[in-house]
Image (cartoon, rainbow, N blue to C red):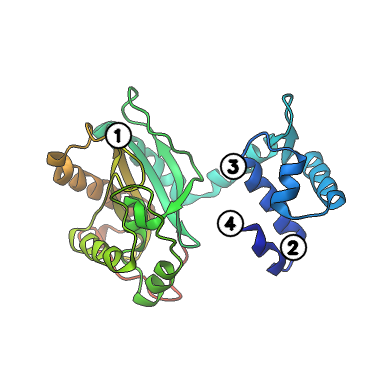
Amino acid sequence: MNKTGEVSSLKVPALGKGVALLEAIAREPGLGFTGIQERLGMPKSSTHHLISTMCELGLIKRRSLGGYALGLKLLELAAVASESNDLQRDAMPLLREFAQQVQLTCHLGVLEQGEAVYLARVEGARDIVVKSHVGQRFPVNCSALGKSLIAWLAPELLDVVIANLAFEKRMPKTVTNAADFRLQLSDVRRRGWALDDEEQAPNCRCIAAPICDRDGVVVAAISAIGTLEQVEDRRFETLAAQVMVAASAISEAVYSTAAQAKAPPRLRATGKRREGR
């Protein structure tokens, strides 16, 4: 649920309002009653009942400084979800090992509703920390992880993803049109890895590679991100090779892909299995 305006089209709008409330508070901790009401577009009485119910369930809580914050119940649910996610669980040991090897912040992510989403994050170099968090969403056109996730989509699926991109110009190097973006994706497929060279944030470079299931279909991706000093031009090829080896190791560990370890990713056709395991 990315837009509260879409709530009314759901079969259970009240549930959609609850999720929209959680997302609003997650983006703006300390958001007060008036701010919540405005963002949800609900009458005062309905907003009051929704907030009260969410507080009773432990999903949100009042802050001592005013406004609301996410509740501890969400941490409990997140922990259960994390434990039940085979991809995240099985990939973490290898992702930690990889982060230590390259001394960069590394992420595991999947494609969801046309956006890249972080499932896991591991820090490498402790002296330089890249700001990111599990659950963070971002456009696929300005991130190496996103490019890796969609580069091998079947044409009809890729067309849908690209048609829904806003192509917001976040940085001078951000690709802002579909034609140039398709050329980038072509390069990704040819090389087997994707690059973000200050396209999403200043002084940040990132290299990513896809994780494939036993059928060779891309279901996730990993990335290594660092500063311009950490990821110099001359390091691109070496780091890209390391990322691809790590992605292949995770593919094998999670999906038993030893037989396809050296095979290139296949196009994800319409109706193929969902992201994740």
According to the picture, the residue beneath numbered tag 4 turns out to be 2
Q: Nearer the viewer, residue 186 or 154?
A: 186
Q: Residue furthest right?
A: 45
- How much space separates mark 2 and mark 1, taking CA atoms? 42 Å
Say if residue 276 shows up in the picture.
Answer: no
Vertical placement of 11 versus 243: above or below? below
The amino acid type of the residue labelled 3 equals Arg
Quadrant for the N terminus, please. Answer: bottom right
Residue under the image location 24 percent in, 58 percent down: 261
According to the picture, the residue beneath numbered tag 2 turns out to be 13
First reached walking from the N terminus: tag 4 or tag 3: 4
Vertical placement of 106 versus 275: above or below? above
According to the picture, the residue beneath numbered tag 3 turns out to be 27
Which of the labelled discs sits on residue 104, or is there none?
Answer: 1
Q: Residue furthest left?
A: 234
Q: Residues within 10 Å of mark 4 (few under 14, many from 20)?
A: few
Residue 98 percent coordinates (x, y): 29, 38
Depth check, mark 2 against mark 3: the one in front is: 3
